[in-house]
Amino acid sequence: MSLDIFTKTKPTIKPISISFNTLSLNKVDSIFLLESQNSEHPWSKNQLSESIKNPNNVGYSLSLDGQIIGFVIAMTAVDTADILNIGINPKYQKKGHGKSLFVYLIKELKYRGIKDILLEVRKSNIQAIKFYLRLGFEKISVRKNYYMKNSNQLSERDDGIIMRLEI
Ligand SMILES: CC(C)(COP(=O)(O)OP(=O)(O)OC[C@H]1O[C@@H](n2cnc3c(N)ncnc32)[C@H](O)[C@@H]1OP(=O)(O)O)[C@@H](O)C(=O)NCCC(=O)NCCS
């Protein structure tokens, strides 16, 4: 009897399924939602669609139990890739998902013969800069006043930090 009770009351732990998938046009709405949650200057659905359709680009989504919680898009040229966009649903940030998506991307890029990854990030996006530094990126240069903030005034502009990772 005690064994019976034990087996009936034993907590069941349901493993979470994590999957990485190539971005396709039918995911644009989900990616747009993530973009809007993450950025004051989100890409439009049209920009996302064009980016996904571009044959030089590679993009992946990360899903937890079938729900898309992250995405990354990179543009490839010969042996270099530029990160165009990356985002993790704010509710799931700082739990290692951005890193696992990036590690997946690196594996795919290596398979395609990519040797260097470059990206540009707003100087004020401290969270993203820390994330890239943890992944091993180094700062290689600064583009002064590259990003607009809320107006077109020079004083209202943000520098762009260019970072590089050899893979
Ligand atoms: C940047 C972003 C993709 C990181 O994803 P994430 O899932 O939160 O990051 P992870 O949890 O995988 O963190 C990976 C590493 O970065 C570090 N990190 C992430 N966010 C950090 C923060 N806010 N402060 C300090 N370190 C941070 C983590 O500590 C972790 O290091 P560890 O491996 O030693 O533990 C995510 O914050 C995001 O979507 N931001 C909004 C969109 C954006 O800014 N995109 C970049 C545009 S250039």
Image: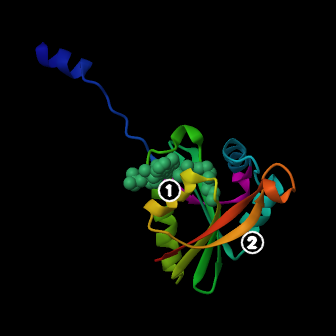
Q: Residue at x 69, y 63 (%)?
A: 159
The residue tagged with tag 1: helix, strand or loop? helix
Q: Please report contact status of discs 2 and 1: CB closer than 8 Å, yes or no.
A: no
> Quick one: label 2, few (<14), some, or many (20+) residues within 10 Å?
few
Instruction: Identify the residue shown where x is 83% and y is 60%.
Output: 154
User: In the image, is the residue at mark 1 within 8 Å of ligand 1 by its beta carbon?
Assistant: yes
Above-or-below relation of 156 to 92? below
Q: Is residue 31 visible?
A: yes
Q: Residue at x 53, y 75 (%)?
A: 109
Residue found 69% across the figure and 77% down from its top: 56
* 94 left or right, relative to 42: left
* Image location (x, y in percent) of residue 22: 60, 62
What's under tag 1, amino acid-wise?
Lys
- The quadrant of the rendering that contains the N terminus is top left
Can the viewer see residue 62 in this picture? no
Residue 110 within the segment the image draws in magenta? no
Read off the magenta span: 19-28
Most foreground residue, 19 or 5:
19
* Image mark count: 2
Q: Closer to the camera: disc 2 or disc 1?
A: 1
Residue furthest right in the image: 152
Q: Which mark is residue 130?
A: 1
State the separation of the CA atoms marked 2 and 1: 29 Å
Residue at the spot of label 2: 54
Give the vertical position of 134 relative to 149 (above or below).
below
Residue 151 in the figure: left or right of residue 43: right
- The residue most toward the left is 2
Q: Residues within 10 Å of mark 1 (few under 14, many from 20)?
A: few
Tell which residue pokes out farthest to the top in this image.
Answer: 1
